Amino acid sequence: MFDWFSLNDSSIATPGELEATELLRSDHDSIKELFDRFKKAADRRAKAKIAREAIVELKINAVLEEEIFYPAVRQRVAKDVMNEADEEHHVAQVLIAELEKMDGHGDHFDAKFNVLAENVRRHIKAEECELFPRAQNSGVDLVKLGRRMQHRKELLLAGESGPKFHHRAASSRPQKS
Ligand SMILES: [Fe+2]
């Protein structure tokens, strides 16, 4: 198991390092760009390929938020904001699971993907406008958090996430109180 203490423990970002919220904003921009490309893509193959890429990025983003970012800020951000974020992730996970079964085909594939995209766009807006500013004022060390998230992201991209990755969002939702 990875030892988090072996990561640089400084609260000052080194050149190129992103704070947690900056890293997530950058990932959000990339996801929204894929949604735009899906809309403009002319043929089925192109749409299926873009949808696959978007789903991988959405899953990585969900893991980073649910495993690292949300737990770090949950106690310092209004409970209703966090609970809504949890539920929005859950809805996205349900749609993603259905889209994966369709593998780019089927009558409702485009409609389902576009509904996912609209939901995720709203969710991203809520995170960036409500959650992130609260996190930035919470006293949480966003440099250290960003470092942990970047490391986790690299493991996910390298395929070292294991089967947990595929169903993680649905299986590990925080218990509602
Ligand atoms: Fe999110």
Image (tube, rainbow, N blue to C red):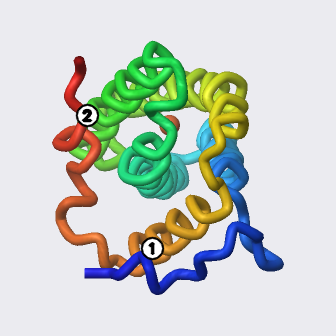
Q: Is residue 119 left or right of residue 25?
A: left
Could you tell me which quadrant the N terminus lies in? bottom left
Question: What residue appears at the point 67 percent right and 62 percent down from the top-left corner?
Answer: 143
Question: What residue appears at the point 17 percent right and 42 percent down from the top-left corner?
Answer: 171
Across and down, in percent, residue 65 comes to: 46, 46
Towards the viewer: 97 or 177: 177
Q: Is residue 120 above or below residue 11?
A: above
From the image, tell me which residue sits under label 1: 157
Q: Is residue 128 left or right of residue 67?
A: right
Q: Is residue 99 above or below residue 177?
A: below
Could you tell me which quadrant the C terminus lies in? top left
Which residue occupies the extreme right position in the image?
15
Across and down, in percent, residue 20 comes to: 63, 54
Between disc 2 and disc 1, the foreground one is 2
Q: Is residue 72 left or right of residue 118?
A: left
Mark 1 and mark 2 in contact (Cβ < 8 Å)? no
Q: How would you rate the neighbour count of disc 2 (Cα within 10 Å): few for under 14, some for 14-19, many for 20 or more?
A: some
Element assignment for label 1 = helix
Q: Is residue 177 left or right of residue 88?
A: left
Question: What residue appears at the point 49 percent right and 47 percent down from the top-left corner?
Answer: 69
Across and down, in percent, residue 101 comes to: 21, 44
Amino acid type, residue under disc 1 in the picture: Leu
Towards the viewer: 75 or 153: 75
From the image, tell me which residue sits under label 2: 174
Asked whether the viewer can see residue 93, the reply is yes
Towards the viewer: 5 or 94: 5
Q: Earlier in the sequence, mark 2 or mark 1?
A: 1
Amino acid type, residue under disc 2 in the picture: Pro
